[in-house]
Amino acid sequence: MDDQFRELYQEIILDHNRSPRNFGSLPDATHKLEGQNPLCGDRYVFYLKVKDGKVEDVRFEGKGCAISKSSASVMSEFIKGKKIEEIDDYVDLFQKIVRGELDPAEYMEKLGKLAVFAGVSEFPMRVKCATLPWHTLHNALHGKHDATVSTEE
């Protein structure tokens, strides 16, 4: 990772960890799911309001490391207004970028801020931290409700 990319990675992680966007509950959520990473203790509840196949609103609450919290925060901003099918593509793409399976430079325009999470691939123990929100989101959108999903499933 070059120095400019590393600096951007750190800036976004720190900003979204200090001031997470869409943090809190969502009383009129149509989907709710808890996600946890039992190896490090990250645990979040995600609330989604889905209408006509689109995510109208999203919130999350809980606690975890800076990487998981910032991933949840950036994700929450990114998915608002998107169709479930479109989100599914991004879930897959994000996970491949974070695991180092794709070159983030090829997807910078499509991913925006999400591309900086490619830096996590340099720290394999932190990949589950970054992907926890996405794993939980995918399960919430595809039938698991009012349960708990784990990064160890």
Image (cartoon, rainbow, N blue to C red):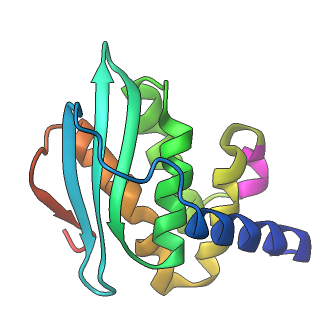
User: Mostly what secondary structure, the magenta segment?
Assistant: helix
Using the image as rendered, state which of residue 24 and residue 8 is in the foreground: 24
Q: Tell me the residue at 48%/45% (across/down).
A: 76
Quadrant where the N terminus sits is: bottom right
- Percent coordinates x, y for residue 2 in the rendering: 87, 74
What residue is rendered at 70% in x and 64% in y?
12
Give the magenta range.
104-108
Q: Is residue 95 visible?
A: no
Give the position of the C terminus as an image quadrant: bottom left
Position of residue 61 in the picture relative to residue 80 (left or right): left
The residue sitting at 76% across, 47% down in the picture is 108
Instruction: Locate residue 125, reporting x and y percent.
Output: 46, 86
| Rendering coords of residue 122 (x, y %) | 64, 81
Which residue occupies the foreground of this view, 81 or 124? 81
Q: In this picture, is 13 found above or below 102? A: below
- Residue at figure coordinates x 71%, y 56% from the top left: 104
Q: Is residue 105 visible?
A: yes
- Indicate whether 100 appears above or below 54: below
Q: Does 95 appear above or below 3?
A: above
Q: Is residue 83 magenta?
A: no
